[in-house]
Amino acid sequence: MLDVAKMAWHFPLCEIVSQLNAPSASSAYPAARLGMLAYMGYGVPKDRDRAFRLLRWADDRGCRTGIFYLGLCYFYGYGTERDYARARECFEAFPGDDPDKCYLLGWIYCNGQGAPEDIPRGVAWLQKAGDHPAAQEELQRYRQTRFTRRWVRK
């Protein structure tokens, strides 16, 4: 049986190298897909430094396909320095309310990393994360005041 992910790792890479100066998002799409495969280690060795380079290359050319994984690289410092502000930008550009996205945005706002501290906004994101275990744990650190109903640290 063919390992499609492994084939995708080798073949399009040659195509990507030949298109490094191509400005269109369609030529950057294979790079974003390869970056996501490398980040997760699906069918290829997990290599988050390489994933960051591919995802950043694709993003610089207008392809937003791997924007969430690029945000994870910035958040955790994979392949680059930690940059919570850029991570926040990436997560906010990612469509939908993925629980991981909501948790990470909530953490960023509640802790004032990469954005001014905004506990009510952070708690709103953490609540959107639903049953995400880390979000539930983070929510335990905050409470609403009795009269003003504002969210504050415990």
Image (cartoon, rainbow, N blue to C red):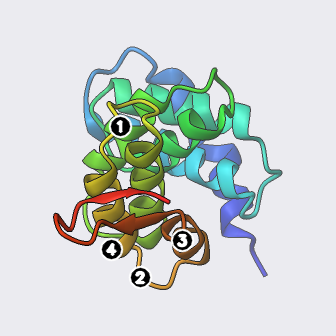
Contact, mark 4 vs mark 1 (Cβ under 8 Å): no
> Across the whole image, how many numbered discs are drawn on residues?
4
Q: Looking at numbered disc 3 in the image, what kind of residue is underneath it? A: Gln
Q: Residues within 10 Å of mark 3 (few under 14, many from 20)?
A: few
Q: CA distance from mark 1 to mark 2?
A: 22 Å
Tell me the residue at 66%/31% (across/down). 77
Q: Looking at numbered disc 2 in the image, what kind of residue is underneath it? A: Gly
Q: Secondary structure at mark 1?
A: loop
Choose between 13 and 31: the one closer to the eye: 31
Tell me which label, 3 or 4, sits earlier in the chain.
4
Contact, mark 4 vs mark 2 (Cβ under 8 Å): yes
Mark number, residue 128: 4
Give the vertical position of 73 relative to 149 (above or below).
above
Q: Which residue is mark 3?
A: 140
Q: CA distance from mark 3 to mark 4?
A: 15 Å
Mark number, residue 130: 2
Tell me the residue at 28%/65% (across/down). 124
Q: Which residue is mark 1?
A: 117
Q: Looking at numbered disc 1 in the image, what kind of residue is underneath it? A: Glu
**Residue 30: x %, y % from top left:** 47, 45
- Residue situated furthest right in the rendering: 45
- Residue situated furthest top in the rendering: 21
> Is label 3 or label 4 in front?
3
